[in-house]
Amino acid sequence: MIEGKSISKYVRMAPRKVQIILDLIRGKKVEDALSILHFCPKKASIPVEKAIRSAIANVINEEGSNKVNVEEYFVKNALVNEGPVSKRFKPRAMGRATRIRKRTSHITIIVSD
């Protein structure tokens, strides 16, 4: 069993939004997952698609291009972890300020045959 792994770190997107996209593709074949992500209107589908393509490229690089049949691969595991949070302040009424939390994500994709 050959596995390929890809980690995208510090993606400037909230983990809650990425998790919705990962739930769509977990357990699907790679070709189906890429077509779902390509036509998905969510902004989080772009970094997830890049991570899947990177995981497949890692498999091809590791095993050699003539040994790998990409059609047999599926998304074995897809998870998102919370990255560091940038904190900003926004002025509000009556001299107050509100904290704005700009969240980041770490996306991990594992593909297997």
Image: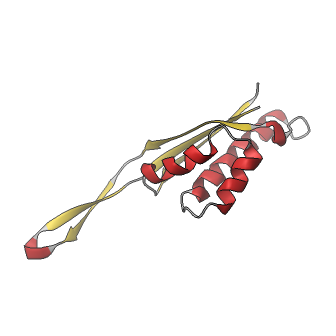
14 or 12, nearer to the observer: 14
Please give the name of the residue rendered at 59% of the width and 64% of the height, measured from the top-left corner. Answer: 41
Q: Residue furthest top?
A: 1
Residue 113 visible, this orientation: yes
Q: Check the image and name the residue furthest to the right.
A: 66
Question: Where does residue 10 sit, x and y in percent of width and height?
Answer: 47, 51
Would residue 53 be visible to someone looking at this image? no
Q: Is residue 9 left or right of residue 62?
A: left
| Of 107 and 84, the residue lying toward us | 107
x and y percent of residue 26 in the render? 62, 40
Q: Nearer the viewer, residue 89 or 72?
A: 72
Picture quarter with the C terminus: top right
Give the residue at x 76% y 48%.
31
**Observer-nearest of 100 and 9:** 100
Q: Is residue 79 above or below residue 48?
A: above
Is residue 112 rendered to the left or right of residue 67? left
> In the picture, which quadrant includes the N terminus?
top right
Q: Coloured how?
A: secondary structure
